[in-house]
Image: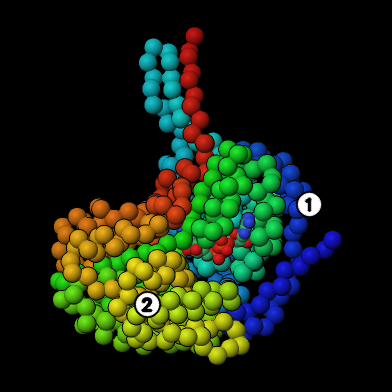
Amino acid sequence: MKTTLAIFNPATATLIAELPADNAASVAAKNGLAHAAQPGWAAWPLAARKACITRFRTAIVAELEGLAVTLTLETGKPVSMSRNELNGLLGRIDFFLAEVGAATATQTVFREDGMTEQIEHAPLGVIANISAWNYPWFVGGNVFIPALLTGNAVLYKPSEYAAMTGLAIARLLHGAGVPGDVFVPLIGGATVGAALLEQKIDGLFFTGSHATGSKIARAMGPRLVKLQLELGGKDPSYVCEDADPQLAAEALADGAMYNTGQSCCSVERIYVHEKIHDAFVAAFVASVKTFKVGDPMARDTYIGAITRAAQLDVLDAQVADATAKGATLLLGGQRLPGPGNWYAPTVFANVNHDMALMREESFGPLIGIQQVSGDSEALRLMNDTRYGLTAGVFTHDEARARTLLAQVNAGSVYWNCCDRVSPRLPWSGYGDSGIGLTLSSYGIQAFTRPKAWHLRQV
Ligand code: NAD
């Protein structure tokens, strides 16, 4: 039976494409072909696989504007941010190309009396990558680029909200020389993802929500397949009394609202020392007011559409809950008129941890600011979460920031910055933010199996 996936522009609610979709049978067939193709790909010299990824990079540069428009049309991301994502990906590709040789070189760790011990970084085999829509080039690229470079075949299921981008990625990789059965896009939603879990695969790399990630962990548990889950967050930042309230407010307004608040590492909770609370809040609201809301295709738009219509209900519920529990609404607080999915940038003060907006991922342009009496209260509140992706401290005092951040349970910590990802550093989370990591040299080795060689010369 032929099925299709309908793609709607979330900024206008218009149908923009109907893509042929996969089903359980096509997923199984493509997995078989990937298993047949993978050993040949792994046998290519690393230099030849690197040459493919270098050509992929060149093709992205050549088509950057069209790729940015595609991403904006299907996700509602402001086009300037689509361009930023693609340009940012180039740096990540450069990092992977530069590091893969050293990260995966066979190491001789012992040689004595005719006995040699070596560690080889063998590819995992055929891996599945189930991906999210909010940064499809970034979160996809963090997986499929090092996976391909290290000799794996990749079954890539883009989000149903970024499937046109997924197909563009496949087209460019194939055009760059990666065989069709080595990088395989699978188009569809949850049922196609679930069909992938049924396959014989050698690793599953997932980026998405905690709700889906925990379902996947339950399904994969008995299979004993390598599993990585990069999930959501409720990322806090604390502004100390010695910080410049204006600079901190500008940085945190951007950290909270960039990509319309739909980043895994968006700032989702702000704690401000009581001595500068009022000045900070005034500067924060003024900063958010400068953000232009509107057509994602316009050059100067900063707040675009909400990609998934269902998220509007989450935002409404968090606003209603905060209001009912006594929070002060300073800006926004409601949907904006359609067509499409729109929410006003929303700022609350006088919030506390009884409110859902300080506990559950908002994933939209919604933020709560809570006044604190000092470092110990801020630290207690920052750690009062089931998540742990990132956390930040704004202060002039590096030693104070280091002392605080050392005690925060988060995979990435920031001093005087936020909402930042570097290819050189590992990207991982504590608690419900996931297991495993991408990026850095560890995020290259993650796609390999360290194989132990014991070699006796006789
Ligand atoms: P989602 O969980 O709704 O979907 C993610 C992917 O899982 C999609 O491809 C979807 O089709 C697939 N899927 C859904 N149900 C499935 C099932 N039962 N079996 C197999 N696959 C299934 O998440 P989303 O809305 O695409 O992404 C937003 C979430 O991702 C947010 O929580 C965000 O914080 C998180 N995220 C995390 C990171 C990170 O690096 N930690 C990066 C980006 C996004």
Where does the image place residue 91, in percent across and percent down from the top left?
A: 44, 61
Nearer to us in this view, 107 or 206: 206
Nearer to us in this view, 181 or 415: 415
Nearer to us in this view, 84 or 339: 339
Q: Quadrant of ligand 1?
A: bottom right
N-term-proximal mark, 2 vs 1: 1
Farthest right residue? 1
The answer to whether residue 344 shows anywhere in this view is: yes
In the rendered view, would you say 190 is above or below 8?
Answer: above
Question: Residue at 70% across / 52% down in the picture?
Answer: 195
Tell me if 201 is positioned left or right of 236 in this view: right
The secondary structure type at the circle numbered 1 is helix
Q: Badge 1, how many Cα within 10 Å: few under 14, some, many 20+?
A: few
Where does the image place residue 104, in percent across and percent down from the top left?
A: 47, 39
Q: State the image quarter where residue 267 is shown.
A: bottom left
In the rendered view, would you say 217 is above or below 91?
Answer: above
- The residue type indicated by label 1 comes to Ala
- Residue receiving disc 1: 25
Q: How is the image coloured?
A: rainbow
- The residue type indicated by label 2 comes to Lys
Question: Residue at 32% across / 71% down in the picture?
Answer: 352
Whether residues under marks 2 and 1 lie with C-beta atoms below 8 angstroms apart, the answer is no
In the rendered view, would you say 339 is above or below 252?
Answer: below
Question: Residue at 40% across / 58% down in the picture?
Answer: 387
The answer to whether residue 94 shows anywhere in this view is: no
Question: In the rendered image, which quarter contains the N terminus?
Answer: bottom right
- Residue receiving disc 2: 325
